[in-house]
Amino acid sequence: MKEFWPYLKMLRPVKWHFTGAIFAGIIYGLASGFGLPFVTSEVFPIIFNQAEYAHFSKEARDVLTHEQMQQMTDEMGEVITTEQRKELGWDKDQGTSFWILILAVAILPASFAVRGLSAFANTYLINYCGVRVLEKIRCMIFSKLQVLPLSFFQKNQSGELVSRVVVDTTQLQNGIIFVANDLVKQPVTFVGAIGALIYLSLRESDLAFILLCLLTIPVAVLPIRYVGRKMLKKARLMQDESGDLTGILSENLSAPREVRAFNLKEREEKRFFNSVRRLFAHQMKVVKYANMLSPLIEFISAVGIAIAIYFAARRGVTLEQIVPLIFALYMSYEPVKKLGMIHNRVSQATASLERIEYILDAPIEVPEPEDPKPFHIDVGAIQFDHVSFSYDKSPTLKNVDLTIEGGQVVALVGPSGAGKSTFANLVSRFYDVQGGALRIDGRDIREVEKKALYDSIALVSQDPVLFNDTVIENIRIGRLDATREEIEEAARNAFAHEFIVDLDNGYETIVGEKGTRLSGGQKQRIALARAFLRNAPILILDEATSALDTESEQKIQQALDKLLPGKTAIVIAHRFSTIRSAERVLVFDDGRIIADGPHSEVYQTCPLYKDLYDKQA
């Protein structure tokens, strides 16, 4: 349970609901554990004594007059003592007896009404608190995912992360609500039942009977610890397999074209079906341990009650005396059974919490500065001061030392894996440099608020991401406060306006998940429109025209010729036709910059660049 303590502070906004839930749980526990056995022992004798008197009075009235009944009672007074007369209720008139009987009978439904209303209040308020806490945890997870480094997402499947955010939080919610419903009620019920058992036994002056009844309770607790440990282990395996299954499904749904093109149907079905079978096996083990505890405790309870009945019979205890005791004993075992089920649910919830905390406790490798300084780009000069960087101890950039002047267009060229994308990612501070420093206009970007830095950079990637929203909202991502006129102007600059107005609903057309309703070239032009709309002083183009046809590429190049002046631009070039506007070419090879200069100069002095260029030419 200690794993859950840090999250109790989230109850502060709902502290009054939680207080009310505890109060209602205490009332329920006392009404169940102590109240019902007490009612059984105190009220039932009154009810049945009154019933006997009423039955006797009815038969007597059928054959005797009032005077005869009085005379008979006087004569019987010589034999029946005053105490016996009071016990039988013969000293009361018929009206008084009737109302006492009604009042005594009414106590039982009143007791259950108190018990039921307090149970409802406890359950409702606890559910309210539990759902609100889980709401906050979900928001915490989502917010944490927004600031985790790109390396975190490269190491973890998106489907696995979705499973942690959706499935594990649901499991945690169900566990917390189930536990919270009984966490107050059952201990109080147990204490109340033990109190009633002690009270009733002491009234009969039989402490040995109390000890005998209580002796079996610790035995009932023994299976709880064993089953709980097993449950935690099996629940972890089940949740891990559930995450794997979600990952397989997410991966399959993200590549329907490849699955069909490479005839992967049988392979994908085999992967999915095997994961389903493994999940089923883990689920059944969890079900086994979750449900074996209740019958075990019930059996132990039955043994304890049987022993109590045996000794009660040997001691000549009457039925009227034994029923409340058995009732109190039963009410003490029921909470033990419920607490055992709570232990199982806590084990399942703990497994889910561990998977959730994998995200919540993940280190933020690109933190906000403790004292961020105001940031505004005046020139846009980018300085790499002996910068080094590596992924998993594999060097990607090695002692890069250069300055890109403000307003300069620089093309990055080199074979795959040479360090071009890493160079651009460091400028955007998607990663922090591991050696040296990276400055913009003389300011170390680690000292700048990330939001201010991101607002100063426009990015167009090779594989643009579109959200399942309208065209206009996908362009508006470039600047959220943009007007419709500004959005349409940006679309025209990106040569996207023409195809947008031809769509069924124009700018209000839903593009589908990841833009599946648009062609590759159309998606790329939407992404370019975002960059035009953002109008940031630094522009990073990761082969932004790679998906365009020749005609569109020429138009985009013309638009870029208008957009680039006055901006610092980094162009990652895979097609050399895109670097004609570049004033400077940086050639990367194995994490180092081996050539730096204008195209004509680099072409003459760098064999690698000449070879790459000639192959495309």
Image: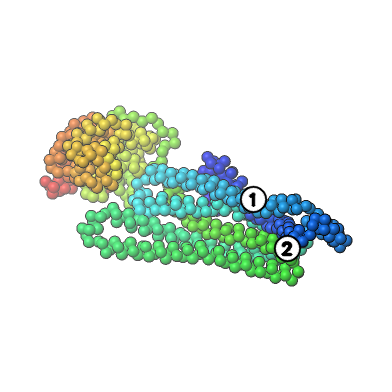
The answer to whether 340 is drawn above or below residue 539 in the figure is below
Residue marked by disc 2: 321
Residue marked by disc 1: 110
Where does residue 243 sit, x and y in percent of width and height? 39, 56
User: Label 1: few (<14), some or many (≥20) within 10 Å?
Assistant: few
Is residue 258 among the parts visible in the rendering?
Answer: yes
Where does residue 261 sit, x and y in percent of width and height? 21, 58
Residue 563 relative to residue 81: left or right: left
Which label belongs to residue 522?
none
Q: Nearer the viewer, mark 2 or mark 1?
A: 1
Where does residue 468 sit, x and y in percent of width and height? 29, 44
Residue at 61% x, 64% y: name it: 220
Q: Nearer the viewer, residue 40 or 236?
A: 40
Residue at 47% x, 63% y: name it: 286
Q: Which residue is most to the left?
A: 617
Residue at 28% x, 30% y: name it: 483
Dot 2 lies on which element? helix
Q: Give, as a three-letter code, the residue at label 2.
A: Gln
Residue 15 relative to residue 532: left or right: right
Mark closest to the chain's N terminus, 2 or 1 = 1
Q: Give, as a three-letter code, the residue at label 1.
A: Ala
